[in-house]
Each structure stands twice: as C-alpha cells, then as structure tokens.
Image: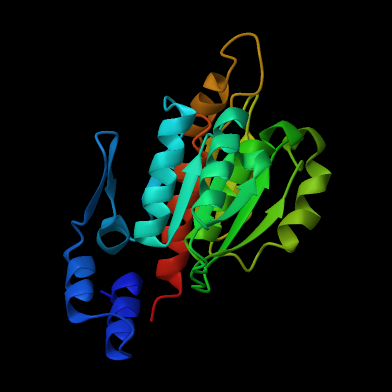
Amino acid sequence: MPANRTLAALLERYRAGEISLEAAAQEIEGLRLEAVGELAQIDLGRQVRCGLPEAVLAEGKSAAQLAAIVVSHARAAGRCIVTRVSVEQADAVRRATGEAGLRLEERTEAGVLIASDGRERPRTGGVVAIVTAGTSDIPVAEEARAVAEEMGCTVRCAYDVGAAGIHRLFPALKALLGAHVFVVAAGREGTLPAVVAGLVDRPVIGVPVSTGYGYQGEGQAALGSMLQSCSVIAVVNIDAGFVAGAFAAKIANQAVSP
C-alpha cells in the first residue's frame, strides 16, 4: 500500500526541521481533538487517519457558534472548510476571521467558506471531472468541486450537458477524458451518470440532485434511477456534493500515489 500522502508530508516537514518531534508525534497520532468550549470537538487527526479533511457543517449552528468553531479550527489546523453556509452565517464568519487575522475564501454558489492562516492547500496531481445535467445542478456540483480542490485535486467541469440535449455531452466529455474519476450530478430522472459511465473508462460517481417536481420529485426519482443503473456507477445521497467530491478526490489521489 502506498504511504499516506499527508503522513509522508508530515515526516518531510519534521526532517526539514519545520516542526518539532513533539508536534509531529501529536499529528501522527491521528487522534488530535481541539475543544471549542462546550460547542464542538474538532477532529484534527482525520486527515492523517482517513486522507480527507475535517469539515464543518454550518446547518443547525448559530452564526456565533459557527464563527467560533471556524476560527478555532483554522488556527489549529491551518485550514478549515465549511459547508451549507447561510448569508447570516457567512457575515459572522467574515467578521470573526478578519478580526483573527485569518484569510477567508468564499465560494458563494457552493455555499462553502474556506478559512486559513495563509497555508496553501496541497497539490496532489489528482484530476476530478465534474459534469452536470442542468444549470440547476450547479450548486451541488460546486460543493463537490470545492471539496475536491481542498483535497489537492485539479477539477475540470462541464455544466448543462444533460440527456435532454445529448449532443452537448460528447464534446464536453472529450475535454475531460484525462480525469481520474467523474462526478456526475443530475436531477429530474437522473439519467446522465449512467450515460457517462457507458462512455468513459474511469469510475463514475452519481449525485442525485433535488431539482424536479411531481411524482418522486426532490431528487427521489434521480436517486432511484441511479441505483437502478445498468452502467457501473457509485451513487451518493441526494444533494451530497461534499461526499461526492471527497470520494472522488480520494480515488484521484490514490491514482497518482507513488
């Protein structure tokens, strides 16, 4: 099995004298937790254990709670990705990170914020392709994109190329064929992932999106269609852009591991 990329980078930092033996040992444990008062326990060892970053889900948190968690996380880990962020929450995090001297990247269409202490995201060489059936699927696709990029991948996108105008798909795929994995987001009847899987020789992850109405609307028909696909695909839950992006990045990063 190839060495864990994060662990290898950590050992290189220790060899170069950039971190102490004690700090390296703490990170290697993979069990580091950072308490934010009584609000949260931030899992700082997730990257070492699982190869993906700890993320903060904004839903269900007050703006003040979220801001406190993001600042603590970014200070402790160097970077912090936040998903499903409301306008009110984004305003609070923007103020808090500014006061703390942290950088904030706002991916508005994805509902994602990325706070950092200036540390850059890794560059792994993995390539993820993201395709959407329609324009309405783009917010979920952009969440997947933000996560895959945060995990070090280059992401290439082709949007609004669904089965209703199938002639749009073929030139779009031609530009994406160098990717290690495809994420395909579709609402309505969810046809596109199965079509793409029948045309490419790389893993395909289907993401049912809660666009569409009527019988089995809100993504249910798309989910059912993808689960019944005769093409070989993996399927995540409805609107699960984070999961799709993280899974795709793990695949792509393993594809380029030495």
Specify the farthest residue to the top. Answer: 214
Question: Residue at the location (50% across, 50% down)?
Answer: 245
Q: Is residue 252 above or below residue 225?
A: below
Residue displayed at 35% across by 78% down: 9
Give the residue at x 43% y 51%.
247
| Residue at the bottom extreme, as displayed | 16
Relative side of 27 to 137, left or right: left
Q: Is residue 192 above or below residue 23?
A: above
Residue 7 visible, this orientation: yes
Q: Quadrant of residue 14?
A: bottom left
Q: Is residue 81 left or right of residue 169?
A: left
Q: Disc count in the image?
A: 0
Q: On the picture, is 248 further left or further right than 3?
A: right
Residue at the location (51% across, 59% down)?
150
Where 184 sits versus 254, above or below? above
- Here the colouring is rainbow
Quadrant for the C terminus, please.
Answer: bottom left
> Does residue 193 appear in the picture of this structure?
no
Q: Position of residue 194 (x, y in %)?
A: 58, 41
Q: Quadrant of the N terminus?
A: bottom left
Rendered location of residue 122, percent (x, y):
48, 70
Please name whichever residue, 194 or 172, is drawn nearer the observer in this view of the structure.
172
Image location (x, y in percent) of residue 66: 44, 36
Task: Give the image location of residue 235, x and y in percent.
Answer: 46, 39
Q: Answer with the quarter of the image where residue 70 lies.
A: top left
